[in-house]
Amino acid sequence: MASGQKTTWMLTGPAILFLAVFFLVPVSWLLGLSVFDEGSLTAANYQRLADQPLYARLLGITLTIAGWTTLLAVVGGYPVAFLIARTRDWRGILLLLVLLPFWTSFLVRAFSWMVLLGRRGALNQFLEGAGLIDAPLALMFNLTGVLVAMAHAMLPLAVMTMLPVMLNIDRRLLLASQTLGAKPGSVFWRIWFPLSMPGVAAAGILVFVTSLGFFITPALLGSERETVIVQEIIFQIQQLLNWGFAGAIGVLVLVTVLAILAFYNAVFGFAGVAGSARQATSKPLLSAITKPVGNAVLGGLARVTDALYDALAALRLVGRSASAERGPGYPLRLVTALILGFLIVPTLFIVPVSFTEASFLSWPPRGFSLQWFGAVAESAVWQEAALRSVLVALLAASLGLAIGVPAAFALARRSFRGKQVLFALTVAPVVVPNIFIAVGLFYLFSRLGLTSTTVGLALGHAVLAIPYVVVTMMAVVRDYDERLDYAAYTLGANKLRTLVEITLPLIRPGLVSAFMFAFIISFDELTIALFLTGGTMITLPKKMWDDAVLQVSPELAAASVLLMAFMTCVILAAELFRRRAARIKAREP
């Protein structure tokens, strides 16, 4: 075996083996039930899919919701990521504000939006009190409520995916363009925006495929017209025990999503995500058309932006000249503040509700009481669930990083046979509904004795974490300048020393983002926990789900507030240590 092939197998082998055992085998077993009935082949399940238009309609609803969510999250997240990348002093605080919603359970956020958007909710009460409306607006149990809540949930994911790529953009390119006379609009649209496109592509893919698996938000905030296909799969498995037909629906989802991704690859190419343009072996199908059109569009946007900037400068809202080293202007700060407000307000809305004297979540809260915080603090069940969630998330994130980062290097830097297949395998866990993975892992782990164990749960969560690690790191490695490694080789450093002292420090922002993604995905995961936990062995999301099903208690809000306070302290402490280390390093001779 050639040295290059050996290195490729060393990088990709762990990911292939892990996903083959803990993803392909369980899911293939469940999907196989769609074509087998008592040991014989059958097409009855697929014939039923073809005969009943309901399932095609559900698939169309799912794709529509995922598409709009992706557009809203990426467009809304871009200015936030841009501001964070261009700001040094307040970067830690801004990251904290972006990540704050992530530390609140999806369930609690959904209930928060229900209280906010209801006919007698806080938003309608405010608008009526201000005299802006005469009757309550229908903001819930429709597409509006679903998209608002899903965009709120996906915005942090979009921001954190785009941010590492923006942090790696060389500011000297911006300074050089300004030195040559380019105005701010031209600098952004012709230099910055094209260089940030790998992050935008990665964010779009992650948000889209993640949105396909959402069922809690559409179930709570939507109506029958917003029923997604994952809800039907869960209904077929849990209520009707029709595993074969559920598998057929899953095949329909997989084939549709893979077709969409194949079309995207043919038109635009995955070079922005799966590797650099110089590594691509073929050009996208319509690149000869889309590239000139894209350049023309960017040129028009640059001229419009330059004219708008001149107008704002005349009003003294921005400086007469912009520099790559100066902070962002007021318009960007205002837009970012509005988007951050959209992220934070629903999360902070939980705080006053947690102090209510009432025994259920409602607005406005009744009275003031600390009883729910005391109930959570004194409950051994809440404490054990929280500690177990942290432990499982740490294990899953570490395993996901150890497996996903080498695979991302191979996909981004190397050309080898089966590269597209490996990329499809690594992102498949976010395309396949979580219910499939959960049921399949339950089938496998029950035979291995791993159900209701921390190790089994961490393995299951790592399956979901690997795609986020791979896509995030591929976007980062894609823009990494390999000439720095070659320079180290020339100066006598071996590959290991170059990796430790050159490569890893330079891609550290991407590694941190990937680990945080994996940790958050595991920490807030519910579906797998529903099947792989039991008895006293439960996680924090499972505990919250049980309480939400049995009783909508303010304990949910109190637990979320305590969790947010804890994670806020951790992130602030990390930011203080980072600044202290930076000051010490700056004083070194």
Image: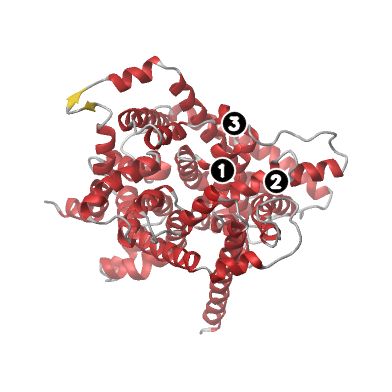
Q: Nearer the viewer, residue 64 or 25?
A: 25
Identify whether 326 is placed above or below 152.
Answer: below
Density class for disc 2 (Cα within 10 Å; few <14, some 14-19, many ≥20) is many
Q: Nearer the viewer, mark 3 or mark 1?
A: 3
Q: In what element is the residue under mark 2?
A: helix
How many labels sit on residues?
3
Residue 87 horizontal/vertical position (percent):
62, 61
Q: Which residue bears the numbered disc 3? A: 223
Residue 135 horizontal/vertical position (percent):
82, 33
Which residue appears at 61% of the width and 69% of the height? 374
**Label 2 vs label 3: CA separation?**
17 Å
Residue 48 horizontal/vertical position (percent):
35, 19
Q: Amino acid at mark 3?
A: Ser
Q: Nearer the viewer, residue 73 or 226?
A: 226
Q: Which residue bears the numbered disc 2? A: 116
Residue 85 seen anywhere in this rendered image of the structure: no
Q: Earlier in the sequence, mark 1 or mark 2?
A: 1
Q: Is residue 23 left or right of residue 312?
A: left
Density class for disc 3 (Cα within 10 Å; few <14, some 14-19, many ≥20) is some
- Evaluate if marks 3 and 1 touch, with contact meaning CB atoms under 8 Å apart: no
Q: Earlier in the sequence, mark 2 or mark 3?
A: 2
Residue 26 horizontal/vertical position (percent):
26, 43
Q: Earlier in the sequence, mark 3 or mark 1?
A: 1
Q: Nearer the viewer, mark 1 or mark 2?
A: 2
Q: Which mark is residue 348?
A: none
Q: In what element is the residue under mark 3?
A: loop
Q: Amino acid at mark 2?
A: Leu
